[in-house]
Image: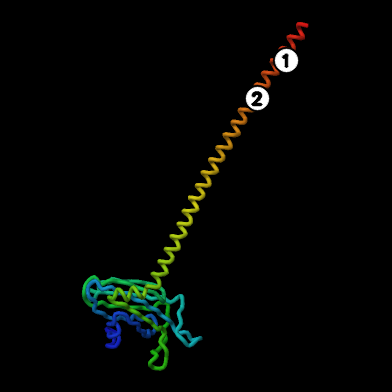
C-alpha cells in the first residue's frame, strides 16, 4: 500500500493519538506524515499475534518489530532503523521540513492466511501511538517513568549519604581506637621502664649489700 487511507492520515495528524491495524504476517506497513523542521516525534508501539488456543491476540516474547523512518524528500534518507521487541518506543526529530515515511515490519510471526474482513483473522494486531511536536504531551506521557527514575536517583543519593556518614563514623572510630592504643602502649612502655629502673636499683642495692657482707666476713 503506497499511502494510508484518509482516515489513517487524519488520525496521524492529531498530535497524540493511538490507532491499531492488522497485518498478515511479516508484511511491511507504511504511513506518511508531513513534519516541520525540528519537530520531535515519539512513538509507542505494541504488536500482538493471534493465538488459536485462546482465540485472541496476545503478546509473545519472541515477536519483534523492525521500524524505519525515511525522508522521502531527500532520496529516502533513513533517519531511524530500529529493531526491537514486540512492544517498545522510538524517538526522532525532523532535521528538515517535508514528508516522512514510517514503516513497521513484524518479525518472527506467521502468515494468517486471510484478512479479518473476510471472516478470518490476521496474524498480527499492531497498535501505534504517536506524539508529534507537543513537548508537554510527550513529557506527560513519560511523566510516570521520569518520576520513577527521579525517585530512584533520590534513593541512591540517600544511600550514598548513609554510606558516607558510615565511612566518617568508621574513620572517627578508627582514629579513637588508634589514639587509645597509642596511649595504652605508651603507658605499658612507661610502666616497663619503671619496672626496669626498680629492678636495676634493687639489683645494685643487693650487689652492694652482698659486697659489704663479703668484705665484713673476710675481715673477721
Classify the position of the N terminus by image quarter: bottom left
Mark 1 burial class by Cα count in 10 Å: few <14, some 14-19, many 20+: few
The answer to whether 80 appears left or right of 180 in the picture is left
Disc ID at residue 49: none
Provide the secondary structure element on which disc 1 rests: helix
Q: Is residue 127 above or below residue 74?
A: below
How was this image coloured?
A: rainbow
In the image, farthest residue toward the bottom: 118
* Quadrant of residue 70 within the rendered picture: bottom left
Cα distance between the residues tagged 1 and 2: 18 Å
* Quadrant of residue 74 within the rendered picture: bottom left
Q: Earlier in the sequence, mark 1 or mark 2?
A: 2
Mark 2 burial class by Cα count in 10 Å: few <14, some 14-19, many 20+: few
In the image, farthest residue toward the top: 219
Task: Residue under label 2, please give it.
Answer: 198
Q: Which residue is at 40% across, 83% downward? A: 124
Q: Position of residue 145 (x, y in %)?
A: 40, 71
Disc ID at residue 210: 1
Residue 132 visible within the image: yes
Q: Of 112 and 58, which appears nearest the observer?
A: 58
Q: Of 93 and 108, which appears nearest the observer?
A: 93
* Quadrant of residue 193 within the rendered picture: top right
Residue 68 visible within the image: no
Contact between labelled residues 2 and 1, with CB atoms less than 8 Å apart: no
In the image, farthest residue toward the right: 220
Q: Which residue is at 45% across, 84% downward? A: 57
Q: Position of residue 39 (x, y in %)?
A: 25, 73
Amino acid at each position: 500500500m503506497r499511502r494510508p487511507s484518509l482516515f489513517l492520515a487524519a488520525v496521524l495528524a492529531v498530535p497524540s493519538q493511538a490507532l491499531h491495524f492488522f497485518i498478515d504476517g511479516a508484511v511491511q506497513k507504511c504511513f506518511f506524515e508531513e513534519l516541520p523542521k525540528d519537530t520531535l516525534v515519539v512513538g509507542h508501539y505494541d504488536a500482538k499475534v493471534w493465538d488459536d488456543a485462546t482465540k485472541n491476540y496476545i503478546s509473545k516474547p519472541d515477536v519483534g518489530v523492525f521500524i524505519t523512518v525515511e525522508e522521502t524528500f531527500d532520496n529516502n534518507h533513513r533517519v531511524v532503523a530500529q529493531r526491537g521487541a514486540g512492544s517498545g518506543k522510538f524517538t526522532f526529530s525532523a532535521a528538515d521540513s517535508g514528508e516522512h515515511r514510517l514503516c513497521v515490519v513484524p518479525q518472527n510471526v506467521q502468515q494468517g492466511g486471510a484478512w479479518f474482513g473476510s471472516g478470518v483473522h490476521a496474524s498480527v494486531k499492531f497498535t501505534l501511538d504517536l506524539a508529534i511536536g507537543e513537548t508537554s504531551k510527550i513529557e506527560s506521557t513519560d511523566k510516570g517513568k521520569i518520576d520513577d527514575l527521579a525517585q530512584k536517583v533520590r534513593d541512591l543519593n540517600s544511600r550514598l549519604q548513609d554510606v558516607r556518614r558510615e565511612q566518617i563514623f568508621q574513620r572517627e572510630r578508627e582514629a579513637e581506637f588508634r589514639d587509645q592504643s597509642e596511649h595504652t602502649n605508651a603507658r605499658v612502655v612507661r610502666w616497663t621502664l619503671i619496672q626496669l629502673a626498680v629492678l636495676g636499683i634493687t639489683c645494685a642495692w643487693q650487689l652492694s649489700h652482698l659486697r659489704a657482707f663479703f668484705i665484713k666476713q673476710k675481715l673477721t
